């Protein structure tokens, strides 16, 4: 794939779940099985994401990834029920990556599964849930260790940390240093970053974060890096 197309897919992957800001947290984080009504709400996020972005002059770069990443080769996906080659290539690639990320990520309601188990599930669903060509390549790369630095990491070289109080992950950024504080967004536990042995770890302070501490913080450095790499490829 030419660098310009790869950059477009990367941008689409970064923005594909934008519409989930329109899905209530009690549905996104529900520990039990979703009801039909709740699942119907989840299924609205591709359209919500596209409506949010569609007015931007560069929206077309991410359109296919946002709108169609839940379409499946079998035609049983959503929101449009596209099948096979009717699904844009960007969406077929992002769909595989999105599913793998979902399976291997730790959520408030469950732990992420091992890489090999997720790869085996993708392999078993090639041509049905996942594009056969993109999915087979993804599995092959995974079994060569290409995703090891992604699973369980906030960013390359920055492992996710688990909250010892409630289980979900605590995200660290490259710009944080030993002595800085980090917070669990689920239970508000405060941690201090410990940089012993050149590897970041977190230690609970015994305190809770304030409302200001718990406000979401954009990883500006990571976003800037993605945009710079994409702009260079698209130039």
Image (cartoon, rainbow, N blue to C red):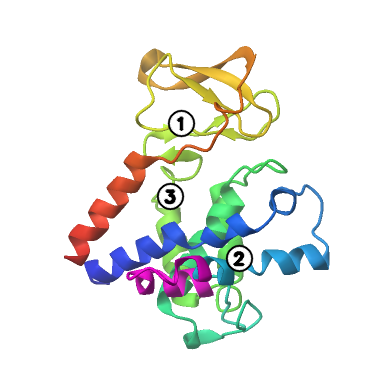
In the rendered image, residue 220 lying in the magenta stretch gets the answer: no
Figure check: 83 above or below 40: below
Residue at position x 33%, y 69% in the image: 58
Camera-near label (3 vs 1) is 1
* Helix, strand or loop for disc 1: loop
Residue at position x 47%, y 37% in the image: 217
In the rendered image, residue 65 lying in the magenta stretch gets the answer: yes
Q: Quadrant of residue 141?
A: bottom left
Q: Is residue 179 left or right of residue 24?
A: left
From the image, tell me which residue sits under label 2. Answer: 45
Range of residues picked out in magenta: 51-68
Camera-nearest residue between 212 and 152: 212
Considering the whole magenta stretch, tell me its main secondary structure. helix
Q: Is residue 122 left or right of residue 219?
A: right
The residues tagged by marks 3 and 1 sit, at their Cα atoms, a distance apart of 19 Å
From the image, tell me which residue sits under label 1. Answer: 172
Camera-nearest residue between 79 and 153: 79
Residue at position x 48%, y 63% in the image: 16
* Helix, strand or loop for disc 2: helix
The residues tagged by marks 1 and 2 sit, at their Cα atoms, a distance apart of 27 Å
Query: Residue 47, how many percent across, how many down?
Result: 57, 72
From the image, tell me which residue sits under label 3. Answer: 147
- The tag earlier along the polypeptide, 2 or 3, is 2
Q: Residue furthest left?
A: 235
Residue at position x 65%, y 69% in the image: 44
């Amino acid at each position: 794939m030419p660098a310009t197309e790869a950059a477009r897919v990367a941008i689409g992957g970064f923005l594909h779940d934008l519409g989930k800001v329109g899905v209530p947290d009690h549905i996104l984080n529900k520990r039990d099985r979703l009801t039909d009504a709740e699942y119907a709400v989840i299924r609205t996020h591709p359209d919500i994401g596209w409506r949010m972005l569609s007015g931007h002059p560069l929206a077309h770069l991410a359109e296919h990834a946002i709108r169609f990443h839940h379409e499946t080769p079998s035609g049983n996906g959503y929101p449009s029920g596209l099948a096979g080659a009717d699904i844009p290539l960007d969406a077929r690639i992002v769909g595989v990556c999105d599913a793998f990320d979902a399976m291997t990520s730790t959520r408030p309601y469950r732990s992420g599964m091992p890489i090999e188990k997720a790869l085996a599930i993708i392999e078993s669903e090639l041509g049905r849930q996942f594009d056969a060509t993109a999915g087979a390549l993804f599995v092959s790369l995974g079994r060569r260790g290409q995703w090891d630095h992604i699973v369980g990491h906030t960013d390359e070289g920055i492992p996710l940390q688990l909250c010892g109080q409630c289980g979900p992950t605590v995200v660290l950024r490259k710009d944080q240093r030993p002595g800085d504080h980090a917070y669990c967004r689920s239970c508000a536990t405060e941690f201090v970053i410990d940089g012993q042995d050149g590897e970041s770890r977190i230690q609970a302070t015994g305190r809770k974060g304030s409302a200001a501490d718990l406000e979401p913080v954009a990883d500006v450095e990571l976003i800037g890096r993605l945009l710079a790499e994409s702009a260079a490829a698209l130039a």
